[in-house]
Image (cartoon, rainbow, N blue to C red):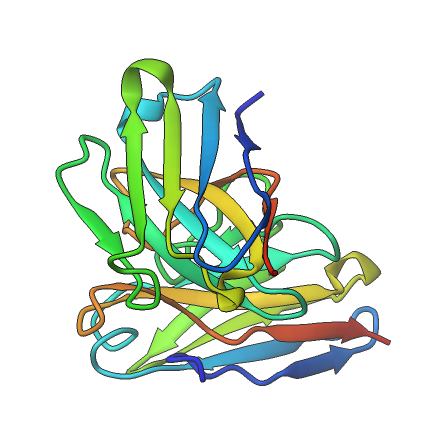
């Protein structure tokens, strides 16, 4: 079964750091653009960051630029999101998503189960 | 405030059809293809329509997408209770150099 399994997340104080991980299986991970999308409690979806299949291109939402770092390890079929200088407004469920590299960057056809990040003192 | 504008809610009765709109601009919908996602309560979103009008394998042909100018639409025919969900449009924005989502539309099947 094609899947993305996420780990990491939890409760962190404002200004703290957290690292999210996402492991892909049963699909050619190295052929997929990978992304992070978040959803604050009771709110809509917000795109966070994307990394193309060879890591040649990386994009960030303005709200996280300079604080979050996306990376991938194709040998381990893994995606990461290093989140630093966390703020209360970063509180959300974070989804790992993938899109075939042949598709537009906004196509997310595989989704992880989501992991909650809570930033609170 | 979302870059893409969707109505917050829509409704219909079983068997009816409903259309959800997504209004954007010349830097997103006007020049790029649109995708639609369905999010059932408590679950991760699911790709419903990609490249404006294409359905992934397994998505019923009751769901269709279209675009005109800087607006896109998702049409659902023959409404079923299982269609009750939030629907989001998404597209690449050339000005923001990133993906933008609509605010989402909650569809209620009465």
Image-quadrant location for residue A52 = top left
Q: Which quarter of the figure is the N terminus of chain A placed in?
A: top right
Vertical placement of B69 versus B53: above or below? below
Image-quadrant location for residue B78 = bottom right
Work out whether residue A52 or residue A90 is closer to the camera in this orientation and state it.
Answer: A90
Residue visible at 50% across and 60% down?
A: A14
Residue A68: x %, y % from top left: 33, 51
* Residue B72 placement, left or right of A69: right
* Residue B87 placement, left or right of A23: right
Residue B9: x %, y % from top left: 67, 82
Residue visible at 24% across and 77% down?
A: B30
Residue visible at 55% across and 55% down?
A: A13
Vertical placement of A27 versus B82: above or below? above
Residue B51: x %, y % from top left: 35, 56
Residue visible at 54% across and 35% down?
A: A8
Number of residue marks: 0
Q: Which quarter of the figure is the C terminus of chain A placed in?
A: bottom right
User: Which residue is situated farthest in the top direction here?
Assistant: A75
Work out whether residue A108 or residue B30 is closer to the camera in this orientation and state it.
Answer: A108
* Residue A40 placement, left or right of B78: left
Work out whether residue B6 or residue A120 is closer to the camera in this orientation and state it.
Answer: A120
Vertical placement of A29 versus A8: above or below? above
User: Which residue is situated farthest in the left direction here?
Assistant: A56
Residue A96: x %, y % from top left: 47, 41
């Amino acid at each position: 079964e094609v899947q993305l399994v996420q780990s990491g997340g939890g409760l962190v104080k404002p200004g703290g750091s957290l690292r999210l991980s996402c492991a892909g299986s049963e699909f050619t991970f190295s052929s997929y653009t990978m992304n992070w999308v978040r959803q604050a409690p009771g709110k809509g979806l917000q795109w966070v960051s994307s990394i193309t299949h060879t890591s040649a291109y990386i994009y960030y939402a303005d709200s996280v630029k300079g604080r979050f770092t996306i990376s991938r390890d194709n040998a381990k079929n893994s995606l990461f999101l290093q989140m630093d200088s966390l703020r209360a407004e970063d509180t959300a469920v974070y989804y790992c998503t993938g899109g075939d590299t042949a598709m537009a960057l906004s196509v997310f056809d595989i989704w992880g189960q989501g992991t909650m990040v809570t930033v609170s003192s | 405030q979302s870059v893409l504008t969707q109505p917050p809610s829509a409704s219909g009765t079983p068997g009816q059809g409903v259309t959800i709109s997504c209004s954007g601009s010349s830097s997103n919908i006007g020049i790029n293809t649109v995708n639609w996602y369905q999010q059932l309560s408590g679950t991760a979103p699911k790709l419903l329509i990609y490249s404006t009008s294409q359905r992934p394998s397994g998505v019923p042909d009751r769901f269709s997408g279209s675009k005109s100018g800087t607006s896109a639409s998702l049409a659902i025919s023959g409404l079923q209770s299982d269609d009750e969900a939030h629907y989001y449009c998404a597209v690449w924005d050339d000005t923001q150099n990133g993906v933008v989502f609509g605010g989402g539309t909650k569809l209620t099947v009465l």
